[in-house]
Each structure stands twice: as structure tokens, then as C-alpha cells.
Amino acid sequence: ADFGRLGEQIKEADEAGAKYIHLDVMDGIFVPNISFGIPVIQSLRKYVNSVFDVHLMIDRPERYIHKFIDAGADIITFHAESTQKPDECIELIKSRGKLAAMAISPATGIDAVLPYADKLDMILCMTVEPGYGGQKYMPEIEAKVSDLRRILGESANIQVDGGITSENIEHA
């Protein structure tokens, strides 16, 4: 998105039928890039009623979960690798009536998320290294998604993120 036109572009996506808006929040600590934060999400909320799926690629997300929810997040996704308090993150999110999701980076095994799967509304498998857009899709992550599906069943909500194009979407 063009950050100078972000409100307009999100409104366009909403009017085109997008039910979810995925917002990548990066802090320059957990990942080596910085995107935007709470004030931007709060400003965008005025433009649409779409579900805001806020993907926190930030260090110790438990410090900010309430603020992101106050800003308009409907789903909060945090990384298994970003916190030593995953139960606390899940409980903070759920206590506010929002959906909780946990992400795992490409090098992280599914064992990092399985102990929490019954408490989560979604699991996100990164199909690129988190932190930068425009990366090439990592097809080897498909095995991880298949393993999660086999273990958790067809009803599990598994999301993939990164490098997805019209050429590889059938595999993602």
C-alpha cells in the first residue's frame, strides 16, 4: 500500500468486498524493519468496518495488546518467537472478546504452537521470513501446513502469510 493513500486504499479494498484487512506491524526489534503502529490503525478504523487482522511482528507483544485492541483490532496475531508469555497474550486478547492467533516463522517447528492450539482461533505459518515485503514464497512451508492440518483437523483455521501470488496461491 501507498502509506500516503492508506485510508483511501483500505476503503477501496473494503468496497471491493474485502472482509479482512491484514495489517503488518513491525517494530525494528523482533524484525529488522519498521512499519506503523497504534495511531495508524486507529486512524484507519474510521474508514472501514472490515475485520482488522493485526499481525504483531513486535518484541514482547503482551505490552501492547490492549492498545492495539483499543485502536480497532479484531484479530491479534503474535509470534511464538516474540514472547515468553504466550498464555498471557492469548488471555489478554480473549479477555477483550477478540480473536487470538499465533504465528510461527519458517524456521520454527509446529511444536511451538501445538500446546496452545486449543486456545487459539487461528495459526499463521509464515511463508517468508517476517519483516520484509516482496520476498519469494517458500514452498517448503507447505509440509508444515499439512502437518498442522493432519494433527488439528479440517476445522482448524490455518493462515499463510508472505510471497503469495496468483501463480502459487493454489499451493499456499
Image: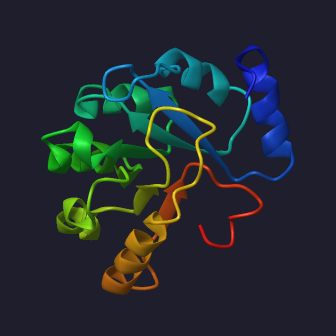
Quarter of the image where the N terminus is located? top right
Which residue extends farthest left?
84
Position of residue 28 relative to residue 93, above or below, is above
- Tell me which residue sits at (46%, 40%) in the image: 55
Left/right of residue 39 with respect to residue 117 in the rendered view: right
Left/right of residue 6 with respect to residue 122 in the rendered view: right
Left/right of residue 97 with respect to residue 163 in the rendered view: left
Is residue 155 in view from this perspective? yes
Q: Position of residue 158 (x, y in %)?
A: 46, 67
Identify which residue, 85 or 67, lies in the foreground: 85
Q: Position of residue 86 (x, y in %)?
A: 19, 47
Is residue 96 in view from this perspective? no
Left/right of residue 102 with respect to residue 128 in the rendered view: left
- Tell me which residue sits at (33%, 33%) in the image: 65
Q: Position of residue 36 (x, y in %)?
A: 52, 19
Quarter of the image where the C terminus is located? bottom right
Identify which residue, 106 or 36, lies in the foreground: 106
- Tell me which residue sits at (23%, 30%) in the image: 60
Position of residue 113 relative to residue 161, above or below, is below
Position of residue 74 relative to residue 140, above or below, is above
Q: Position of residue 121 (x, y in %)?
A: 39, 62
- Tell me which residue sits at (38%, 19%) in the image: 28
Colouring scheme, one of rainbow, by chain, secondary structure, one colour: rainbow
